[in-house]
Image (cartoon, rainbow, N blue to C red):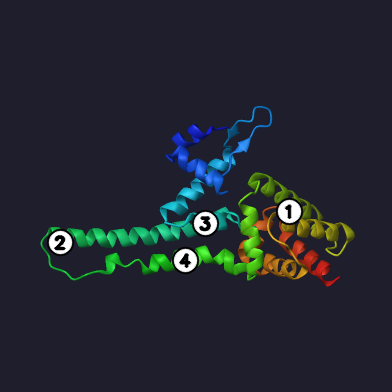
Amino acid sequence: MKLSVSEMAKLTGVSVRTLHYYDQIGLLRPETAADSGYRWYGEADVERMQQILFFRELDFPLKDIRAILSDLHYDKREALLRQRHLLQLKRERLDRLLDLLEANLKGEQTMEFKGFDVAELEDARRQYADEAKARWGHTEAWRESQDKAASADLDGQTAGMNDIFRRAAALRTGDPAAPAAQALVKEWQDFISAHYYRCTKEILAGLGEMYTADERFRKNLDRFGDGTAAFLSGAIAAYCKV
């Protein structure tokens, strides 16, 4: 699939001007064809746009959307589940408002204001938007990752990351302290530093622990083969002890 800017605008209902702005801030960047210089949106870009529109429907600021989508361990299924929950909260609020309107149209006098209350929805949205930032607990690393995200080759990053995870899966039946596994961990550390933030051994060790402690990370890694998360976690633990 290859779509021009105008075709992407027609498909999604987003103006060309808005697409140019998303490109400018690093939220959604089309690929540039080396031979012609034309810029095209691919299938992954269309999927990313759908995610952006879900978040926009839920009134997330663009900077928060970029932060969530640029998360090193962004999980689309997890995002969809969260979005469904938030949309359900929004629907429940709209249903309460419609009930209140119907009551007023029938001439019923009521002092009900619960339908106008957005606190529950706002709290859920804020919790989701803050989660990626709170997850690392390293404010300098967070700022650095945000700066790099603004100029990122997102498709290239995803391909590089998945390649490392696939190779980890291929090694998962072996010794996590073996030279090949340790070399792969070093490659992963360097990849994070190059594309996200300076990944010290302390940060890397924390990531390794989360690969098995956090069910979402474990499932995401085990997509490449059962036991990949545990193997990579063990390899990181061995690497950080050196």
Front residue of this view, candidates 126 and 176 = 126
**Viewer-nearest of labels 1 and 4?**
4
Name which residue lies at 27% across and 62% down: 96
The first of marks 1 and 4 along the sequence is: 4
Disc 4 from disc 2: Cα separation: 32 Å
**Viewer-nearest of labels 1 and 3?**
3
Disc 4 from disc 3: Cα separation: 13 Å
Amino acid type, label 2: Asn
Instruction: Classify mark 2: helix, strand or loop.
Output: helix
Instruction: Classify mark 3: helix, strand or loop.
Output: helix
Query: Disc 4 designates what residue?
Result: 126
The first of marks 3 and 2 along the sequence is: 3
Can I make out residue 73 in this image? no
Disc 1 from disc 3: Cα separation: 28 Å
Q: Is residue 205 above or below residue 221?
A: below
Query: Where is residue 165 drawn, in percent x and y?
Result: 73, 53
Query: Disc 1 designates what residue?
Result: 165
Front residue of this view, candidates 2 and 86 = 2
Query: Where is residue 82 drawn, in percent x and y?
Result: 49, 60
Name which residue lies at 18% across and 58% down: 102
- Whether residue 217 sits left or right of residue 9 in the image: it is right
The first of marks 4 and 3 along the sequence is: 3
The first of marks 4 and 2 along the sequence is: 2
**Viewer-nearest of labels 4 and 3?**
3
Query: Disc 3 designates what residue?
Result: 63
Disc 1 from disc 2: Cα separation: 58 Å
Disc 1 from disc 4: Cα separation: 31 Å
